[in-house]
Amino acid sequence: MTTLDTIRSEIGADGRAGSSRRARLARLARRLPPGLALSWLILATVFLWAIAPALFTSYNPVEGVGGAQLKRPDALHLLGTDALGRDLYARIVYGAVHSLTGAFVAVGLGLIVGTTLGVIAGSVGRRLDDAIMRIVDVLLSIPPLLLSLSIIILLGFGTVNAAIAVGLTSVAGFARLARSEVVRVRRSDYVEAAFGSGGTFRAVLWRHVLPNSLTSVIAIAALHFGSAVLQISTLGFLGYGAPPPTPEWGLLIAEGRNYISTAWWLTTAPGFVVVLVVLAANRVSQSFGKVTS
Amino acid sequence: MTFSADQGTPVLEVSDLKISYHGGERYHPVVHGVSFRVEPGEVVALVGESGSGKTTTAQSVIGLLPANGHVDRGTIRLNGTDISRWSDRQFDTIRGARISLVPQDPGSSLNPVKTIGAQVGEILEIHGEARGKELERRVLALLECVGLPDPELRARQYPHELSGGMRQRVLIAIAIALKPELIIADEPTSALDVTVQKRILDLIDELRAEYGTAVLLVTHDLGVAVDRADRLVVLQGGRVQEEGRASEVLAAPRSPYTRQLIADAPSLSRSAAWVTATARSSTGTAATDDVVVVEQLVQEFPRPTRGEAPFSAVDHVSFRVRRGTTHAIVGESGSGKTTTVRAVVGFQKPTSGKIEIDGTDLSTLGGETLRQFRRKIQLVYQNPYASLDPRQTIFEIVEEPLLNFGNLSRLERREKTLAILSRVGLPEALATRRAHALSGGQRQRVAIARALVLDPQVVVLDEAVSALDVTVQARILDLLDELQQDLGLTYLFVSHDLAVVRQIADTVSVLRGGRLVDEGPVAQVFDHPGSDYTRELISAIPGRKHPAFA
């Protein structure tokens, strides 16, 4: 062991024991990089849009105002209006709930199904492991968009179905990661020691293997959130998601496409929002990854 | 030869050196005003435990402090020139040429995708010393000089094709390539087996005699330091505790810390505190009361290529351990000692042979009966950092075996856990901490507590003290002795360190390449070794140059 290791661990040790929680939070806030702060702000805003859209706009997202079609952005309509006279800003705000719930369902599904498969494969081993991992390999070999389109065609259109389709494409990734983590932890001395002190398979799995292998899986789940938003918008754009007049972001872009030469804001604004949310989610999950590793 | 310093100036003169690390907004001084000098052609050993600042001091000399390390005060003079505040670019001109480093871990210090020849040649190329045919010739000469057999073949090989000792020789070849004035050897042998260690240290000695290079030897092993160094600098907590000629320091240590170090080093002293079980009870129990019986144990592993004969890690090994005594299994890496004990604790089904623990034949066990059997025999691992779950508290770790055999109430479990924690000398306040907040010695105490909480008959200690500093190691050995006396435990003690084995074991088996080469009571094996291999092992124990202390 080198001196440096000791010092690092000493710093770690009295950092945990010495300072109070509040002082640590204050220090964290001071050290928070501006990019990360901005990302949190973006996610918080979008989250609030999803919970209480009425606080942010007084317009109705689905009913247009007569005579106000295709207005340029101005003080009255912040981001202009669409061909039916609906306020675009209101539609984006009300659309947040669709994109966010979709992303949550997709990530949750991928996380639960994928991790379960991975943990089973990693802990039981042998034949079952081989069987599960070959299925995962097959899933990985199909392009995600093609896979989610096929699933949607089987399940039918709609927000939830689109989310399920997106979620199933990430099952393979989660399963692989969970399996590799479980295999790593299973080989560690403390797991063997737990068996050696009389632990049953289930007890050891529950007490040692799961808690120690799932941290990085959770970090990856946060990373998947951003790409799930993107994939759901893609499906919406292609018309496989929520049907009109739902103000889903991908659908907004698709509807605006017909007016791209005369009313650029109809595609630009929702596209910009999607990009911001995805970037923010990636930045935040990256910071998770750093903390857990 | 670039060795040209006149006798007046020391090769290296460190004075009042103060170094600190900056972690975030934290400021951590580690070296507080260290001063010492290295004369031309001299070997000076920096001795200390982990955290004593010895590695940090050595790193600062060659300008390789980690990015968060900073020299706050003091000077480092190389042949009279202060280099303590040099930039990396300035250091580039002298690293390798005038100071060189033999790093600690031969396993990770060579580039795995370049050949040995290319890596040795690199230093000559960087400093513009040679190229083309001349380079090739010099590389081969260097490899031959450090005693690598068949240098032409080695130069074409990759690091993974060489053993640990051979890799360390390659690193030494790189270090001496430009005949520097000073070589810093940072624990050059701590990852190697004793016999290999001896050969490597002999090599450094020879090269020093040949080129007159000064060596700064950084080590935690007082035995090695005393054997090899002209002068010792004993560091503790970043301060020099003692400095002087090696023999003088050993004969008449001035600081209490040095005295403690010498007393705790198993190779330098025979601790009076430890009385082996045979000595304790000469009246003895019945001679037939063998709690561990291993007969003709064979453990084979299939090779990856089909059709080849399986690799036999353990080859017909037999031994018996009497109840309440300590039996040591000794051997170098690859000797099959760990494989043997893994079969004994029931983690592996042996290919053939019989293992009986307290009258139970292991081959009859499986599933639930095997689980119940685990109460009788417990294993303590080598690495206290890997054997404790980082997410559990100390209390949870020690309580867990009781949960597995769930016939105690919550309150009884709590009582028993806390009792065993205090028995191994851990304060109750630590019970709610997690393992990372504990030192190595404390962790190993936790591992011992976990092993003892089920009241086992036999405790298997797999290199259980090898990763610890000498003083910590001595405390753990004392604890094990105490526990054996109080609880009548039987120990199966696996180790590569013969000095420790001699101190604590009653009987010993020496393994080599999976075969038993020597066995018997410790005194007999050590005084009248039955095989050349045992003799070689014993002569490789460091600290034997000073028989008065051996």
Image (spheres, coloured by chain):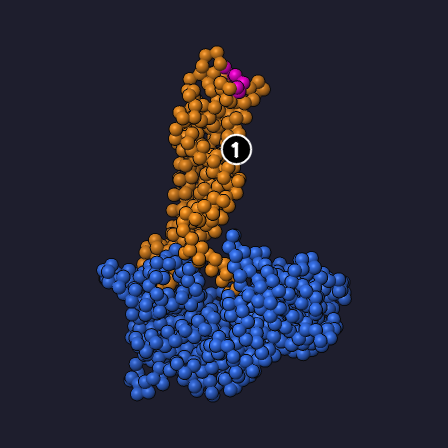
Q: Amino acid at mark 1?
A: Val
* A10 shown above or below A158: below
Residue B372 position within the rendered picture, expressed as x and y whole percent measured from the top left: 28, 65
Please, which residue is most extreme toward the top here? A67
The residue to which callout 1 is attached is A275
* B88 shown above or below B145: above
Relative to B364, A137 lies left or right: right
Q: Dividing the picture into quarters, in which one does residue B243 lie?
A: bottom right
* A123 shown above or below B294: above
Relative to A79, B277 lies left or right: left
Relative to B145, B35 lies left or right: left
Residue B444 position within the rendered picture, expressed as x and y whole percent measured from the top left: 40, 67
Observer able to see residue B58: no
Residue A70 belongs to magenta span: yes
B380 or A173: nearer the viewer: B380
Asked which secondary structure carries label 1, the reply is helix
Query: Residue at point 56% right, 82% down?
Result: B248
Residue B527 position within the rendered picture, expressed as x and y whole percent measured from the top left: 47, 87
Q: Dividing the picture into quarters, in which one does residue B200 lie?
A: bottom right
Start-end of magenta stretch: A69-74
Apparent colour of chain B: blue
Query: Residue at point 40% right, 26% down?
Result: A55
Residue B323 belongs to magenta span: no
**Quadrant holding the N terminus of chain B:** bottom right
A232 or B90: nearer the viewer: B90
Apparent colour of chain A: orange
Residue A33 position within the rendered picture, expressed as x and y whole percent measured from the top left: 52, 43
User: Which of the chains bears the disc numbered 1?
Assistant: A
B458 or B390: nearer the viewer: B390
Query: Residue at point 67% right, 57% down?
Result: B87
Specify the principal SS of the magenta part: loop
Relative to A23, B16 lies left or right: right
